[in-house]
Image: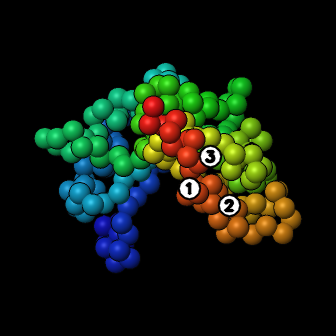
Amino acid sequence: MASLIRQYHIDGLDIDIEEEVDISIPLRLMNALRRDFGEEFIITMTPLSSALSSKNGQNLSGFSYFELDALATVPGSDKKLISWYNGMFYGKFPRGPPTYDAVMDAGWNPERVVMVVLDNYDNGPPNGFRSIGNLQDTVKEFRQTYPGFGGVAGWEYYNAGGSDSGDMQPWQWFKSVGDSLFAKLSTSAIVKDEI
């Protein structure tokens, strides 16, 4: 794997653990990646959002992400090994996935939590799908509520936006999300954040 990362100048790796493992396994992997590729190498993880909303939340990995985040630091410092989390805010949860607000209420920094949603109704359980207009409104609201909001990712690229409009192309779905993420905040929102 190391030669592949070097050959193609890959600048990071997302770790998605969907089976129960001991917490020592991701810790060893992240420390090895840091040692082999340096401090600039980006390490992210993709847990269920419920694993970020509660220490005992539904989890595919078998360990606490709260405990992992506390332990996963550069040796001898408080610098986090995990740059951010791509929280899966969709799936087969009994009452739907936890909200972004619930994850923030659990103490996470909004700069370190990306909200991964379904970008097409057909990509999974419908509880994770939001129409593009609704999603854009949510993004704008989160940017005002959580300065430094970590952003949005869509699952999956190949058919993104297809259930919003039959002729919407994947790049158009992502551009629409980006327009909401990078639009200038209104003056009232800025004043609100400063108070």
Q: Residue at x 56, y 55 (%)?
A: 184
Query: What is the three-letter code of the residue carrying label 3?
Result: Lys
Mark 1 lies on residue: 184
Looking at marks 1 and 2 on the same chain, the residue that comes earlier in the sequence is marked by 2
Instruction: From the image, state whether disc 1 or disc 2 is nearer to you.
Output: 1
Secondary structure of residue under mark 1: loop
Position of the N terminus, as image quadrant, is bottom left
Position of the C terminus, as image quadrant, is top left
Q: Outermost residue, bottom direction?
A: 7
Q: Residue at x 41, y 50 (%)?
A: 44
Q: Position of residue 88 (x, y in %)?
A: 58, 42
Query: What is the three-letter code of the residue carrying label 1?
Result: Lys
Q: Is residue 59 visible?
A: no
- Tell me how far mark 2 sits from mark 3, CA to CA: 12 Å
Secondary structure of residue under mark 2: helix
Looking at marks 2 and 3 on the same chain, the residue that comes earlier in the sequence is marked by 3
Q: How many marks?
A: 3
Location of residue 7 by image quarter: bottom left
Mark 2 lies on residue: 176
Compared to 189, does 173 lie above or below? below
Q: Residue at x 62, y 32 (%)?
A: 99
Secondary structure of residue under mark 3: helix
Mark 2 touches mark 3? (CB < 8 Å): no
Density class for disc 2 (Cα within 10 Å; few <14, some 14-19, many ≥20) is some
Q: Residue at x 74, y 53 (%)?
A: 132
Q: Outermost residue, left direction?
A: 76
Query: What is the three-letter code of the residue carrying label 2?
Result: Ser
Mark 3 lies on residue: 140
Foreground residue, 163 or 187? 187
